[in-house]
Each structure stands twice: as C-alpha cells, then as structure tokens.
Amino acid sequence: MKKTLSLGLAVVAGSATMALQAQEEQDTMVVVGSRTPTQISQIPGAVWVIEKEDLQQQIETGADLKTALGKLVPGLDMAPQGRTNYGQNLRGRSVQVLIDGVSLNSSRGLSRQFDSIDPFNIERIEVLSGASSLYGGGATGGIINIITRKGDVGGPNWRTEAGVTTGFNDSNDLDKRVAQSISGGSERVQGYLGVAYQDNGRQFDANGDEIFPDIAQTDLQDNRSIDVLGNLTFNLDADQTLELGAQLYRSGYEGDRGVYFPNLDAPTPDLNDAEIRDGYRSDRDPATDRKTVNAQYHHGNLLSQDFYLQVFHREEESSFQAFPYPVTDGSEFRASKQNTKLSGIKALFDAQLSDSIGLTYGLDLDREKFDASQMIFDKAVSDASGGLVQERASVEPRYPGYQVDGIAAFAQGKWQVTDGLQLSVGARRQHTDVEVDDFKGIPGGENDYDATLLNAGALYDYGNGHQNWLQFSQGFELPDPAKYYGKSADISVAENPLSAIETDQVELGWRYRGGDWLTQAAIYYSWSDKAVENAEDLSVTVVDEKKRDYGFEGALTRYFDNGIEAGGTLHLVRSDQENDEGEWEKRDARYASLSSATAFVGWTDYIRSARLQTNHVFNLEDDNDRQIDGFTTLDLLASQRTDFGKFSLGVQNLLNEQYSTVWGQRAAMFYSPYYGPGYLYDYQGRGRTYTLTWSVDY
C-alpha cells in the first residue's frame, strides 16, 4: 500500500489575504454543527466548509459535484463517477445529504443524493464528519448540507457561465454546459433565480475506448440535466425573516447509444461479447426528477429566544436502465421507477439561559411515501435487437409501497465553563410508524420502532489559535421497508418490526487556524451491532453483525509569500466486521471504504492563477481475497481574468491513467456472475479530458 503523497498546485488569493483567511476561518458561521448559526470555533467536532470559489476550481477541471467533494472533504470517499454515489461514505459510514436543511435521504436506500443540484447554484457546502443525531436518520458517517445561492441588496446582478469538456476522442466526446442567474432586491426583499443546463456526450477511458454504460445504477453519458432554482427573502422587521425557495431538477438519458448483445437470440443465449452500438430505444430511460419547495422563518426574539421554523416538501422520481434478469431461456430486461414524497416540519428554539449556558431544543415531524413500479420489456423484441430496443410488455409493482411517519424531540445544551473550556450534551428521541402495502399477494401491515441518540463533547480553546475536542456521538441508519418486506409471506410486517441501526462514535480532534497555517485533524472510532446485508436477489436483511470503523482524517494548508499555497488531505480508514467465531476481520470489499489522499500547490497574482492537484485512492483487500485496486490521478487548472470575464482551462487525469472506478469494481462483485459476466459492470474511469470555462459577473 503506497502512503506517499504527491504534491500539486492550488489557486489562492494572495499572501496577505491568505494569512487573514486562516485567522478568519475560526469565526466562520455554519449551520451544520448545531442547526443554528454557530462559529466553527464553538463546535466540538470536525467541520469542513467548501466555499463556492473552492468548489468552482474543481468544477473547472471537469469534475461533477460528487467528484469535487471527494477531492475536497478529507473523510469522504472518492466519487464513483456515474450517476450513483453508492459507497461514497464519510468515515466509512453513510452520509446524510441536505439542500438548505431538506434531506435528500429516505428510507429507500437510493444513492442519488448528488444527482440533485448544479454547482452553479451552490453558495457553499458545510460538512460535519462523524455520527450525528442532529438531523435524524442516515447520518452515521456525517452530514453534508448544501447551501444555495441567495439574493442580495441592489442589482440586478447577472452571472453567466459557459464551458465545454472533451478528451478529443471523437465527435461525440463533448460535454457542454451553460448557466445564467439574476439576483438583487431592496432592503425588504431580495431574490435569486439561477438556471443551469448540462449536456453530456460519450466518455472514453485512457486507452481511447468508449466506456461501457453502467447498466446497474446508470451513468451520466449522453445525459441532459437542467436545474432551476429560485428563492425570495423577506425582511419582515428587525427580528423576523421569511425565506421561500423552490427547485426543479431533471437529469436524464437522451442518447441513442446502447449495449448490444449478439447472443440473445441464439439457441443458448448469453451476455458475452457485448458492444456499444447506435440504435438504442427504450420505453423507460434512466432519469432523476426532483421538485422541492422550502419555507424557513426566523424570529430573533420570540419569548426572548431565537425561533426557527421550516416547512418543506420534496417529490422525486428515480428511473433506471433496462437490466438483464436471468430466466430459463436467457435474459428478460426490466427497468424500475421509484417514487418518493417527503414532507416535514422542523421547529427549534435557541435560548441563552445565562452568560455561560445555552440550550437548543425542538421538534421534527416528517412523512415519507414511497411506491415503485417495474416495466417488463417484450422479450422477443429485446432478443431480436440484441437488447438495443426495449418495448414495454407490462408494468407491475417493483417493491411494496409504504408510508413512514416520524416524530422526534431533541435538546442540546452548552456550558462555557471557563474562557477556554466548553462542555456540551444532547439527546434525540425518535419514534417512527411504518405502514406497508400489500404486495403481490403478500399481506402488508403496520409496526413502529424507536431510537434514542445521545451525544456529549468537550472543547478546549487555548486562546492562540489551537483547539482540542473530545466527543461521543450517536447516529442511526434508516432501515429500508421496500427491500425488507414483500419477499415472503413468512415475514409478517406486524410481527417483524424494523429497528434503527445505531452507530456509536468517539472522536479526538485538533485544529489550528492562524498565521499562515490552516489545519484540522481527528482520530475516530465508530461501532454498531447490526448491519444491512444484500442477498443475491438484491433484497436486504437486517442481521446481528458487529461492525467498526476507525481511522484518521486531516487537512493542512500552508500559505506562502508571493501568492503561493500548498497542502493536502489524508484519510486513513480501517473497516472490520465480526465473524461467527467472534473475531474481527476486514469488512467485505463491497462495502468497506478505501483510504485516500490529495495534495496540491498553486500560485496566483490575482489576474492569473494555476493549480496542480493529485488524488490517490489506496488499495483494499478483504479477508475473502476480494480486492479493489487503487489509482492515482493528476489534475491541472490555469485561469486568466480579462475585461471580458474569467477564462479557465482545466485538465482532469492529466497523465491519462487507465483505471477501473471503485464503484465499477464493486459492481462486478455485486452483480457477477449471477447477472452476467463481470466486464458488463466494471465501470471504467475517464481518461484525460480538457475543460474550457468562461464566466462573468456583471
């Protein structure tokens, strides 16, 4: 296992500005740490803030949102590169993703949280590493809260962006994007409206070969996405604000290239010798559709407390690609569509009980509704066309529909014992009612489950930029009713209630922000006594199995004179599971996180800038000899400001490294040989690409 880090380049804002930035980072206000605006220096935990400038640097190299985050957040796994973010864990566990406090996670474990917003509409991203009870289920590894852009006073202010990405392999190797926003307002009302459009072509690996589509979870080749996001902020009076927001997002396949299987109509059909051809047509294409409305009200002096109220509704449709299921005479292609509706209310009071004691408490209510269908395609048409043409034969339920109602009360206290020492303690009590529909003759039913989550922390500030913290926290993973029930009439819903899969974590951390240094690091240990296990038929079961993850995450940035900056990130993680003999062994490679590292160096004179960055994923091997091969890529970015806007040239995978993505290697383990040969699922990494971006504010 290689542990050496390569150095790279990073864009900075000049030496004087950078030194001030390191000091001012201590006072950055974030919501993710306590659900109320709180300085990072007051949070006993590892918090990472990705500002829009940092995110834009990564996007200008050709990265998408999840790829950029994988390179910027130390504890977050590198991205799978397709549509799915399956296995992109934080500290080896699942992460809860939110947009302006609205969760994109649900009980049904679809991994499309980052196929949700265009980076053009993002102001910043706040990340809290480690298990947390603050926002409910799904945050066993941490929380990622995406903060959208807002309007400001004055204007109208316009922003335009356009870019292209290509590897110069052929005429289809071209991604195009264009985005436009307008914002402005008065002292009383401010507004923002942003529209971003992305049109992807085909993708090629380092050998110049067209990358096979991800037929399991779908990818972003020949994909079109549009993100329309708007909001209004009303300053009702000196103490009251109201923010109304809405978003429409669609991301879907629009091409005519598909996988051709030459043996489907043979006497002994198989899935070998497949190739990519024109002529694809299907009655159900891969797509993600989301609609969200969100209202947030703040009263700064209600009963002498800060009061926050949020009401939201999210609707989501996730469609999948035609997938070959084995039948007696070959393969039958099917594609699912899974629909989720989530509504909720969050109410929170923040009280300062004395000069040294604060209390935050509140109530969360939410309702989630789910249903899914499966389109079965005409086998004769599929066989005759080699799988290129998929015509609807019938539609049937894919999973049992369900409704999940949750209510949770929480309280978090903070005591400033001395000028340097702060203690905190909190608890969350969650009650969930589950109602499952009848499914293919299998009776549904009702049940409920509860979870009690605790946290406690100590933070010490030395007064010289150094801080240490020690924290215990708990989080829980949402069980999946759709895959757990409906498999057999023997699994009665009423007599087999789900249970929250709780994770405990302890963490010891240190940060220093001041002078020419910006650093943060933590060691952690998390454990749980239950796990979700995937069966060969893709259903899931909750099993009594102890799991643990432990490791180190850290980031360091050093600011030099003359506009130079250098640093890196490191995440070392080990994931274990207990076997039947009570001994710890390495966790199954299909689920375990991989250690990773980045390094960078850069320069700017305010007009011109350059960034060189390396990204390394370490090898992983479990105790059953399943192995995931790591890889190293290098990215380069150069930019120039002119009177006509900023021009940026980015090169991703500069050395044209040939590699299989982590998801591709996992998918081959999940789906092969039962669903076909491994090469069908081994999704390859993209070769060298060039991205030219132009942006202007006016």
Image (spheres, rainbow, N blue to C red):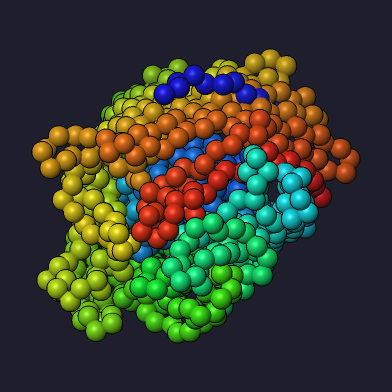
Above or below for 607 versus 414: above
- Is 456 on the left-hand or right-hand side of 141? left
Q: Nearer the viewer, residue 255 or 382?
A: 382
Above or below for 429 versus 655: below
Q: Position of residue 166 (x, y in %)?
A: 74, 46
| Residue 567 visible in rendering | no
- Is 498 on the left-hand or right-hand side of 689? left
The residue most toward the top is: 561
Q: Position of residue 128 (x, y in %)?
A: 41, 41
Q: Nearer the viewer, residue 540 or 645?
A: 540
Q: Nearer the viewer, residue 622 or 247?
A: 622
Identity of the residue drawn at 40% across and 44% down: 89
Quadrant position of the N terminus in the picture = top left
Q: Position of residue 224 (x, y in %)?
A: 66, 63
Q: How many marks?
A: 0
Identity of the residue drawn at 78% across and 54% down: 171
Above or below for 416 versus 135: above
Q: Nearer the viewer, residue 484 or 328?
A: 328
| Residue 634 visible in rendering | yes
Quadrant in the picture for residue 460 = top left
Identity of the residue drawn at 19% across and 43% down: 546
Above or below for 11 versus 272: above
Quadrant in the picture for residue 672 = bottom left
Identity of the residue drawn at 20% across and 78% down: 445
The residue most toward the front is: 267
Q: Position of residue 629 (x, y in %)?
A: 45, 35
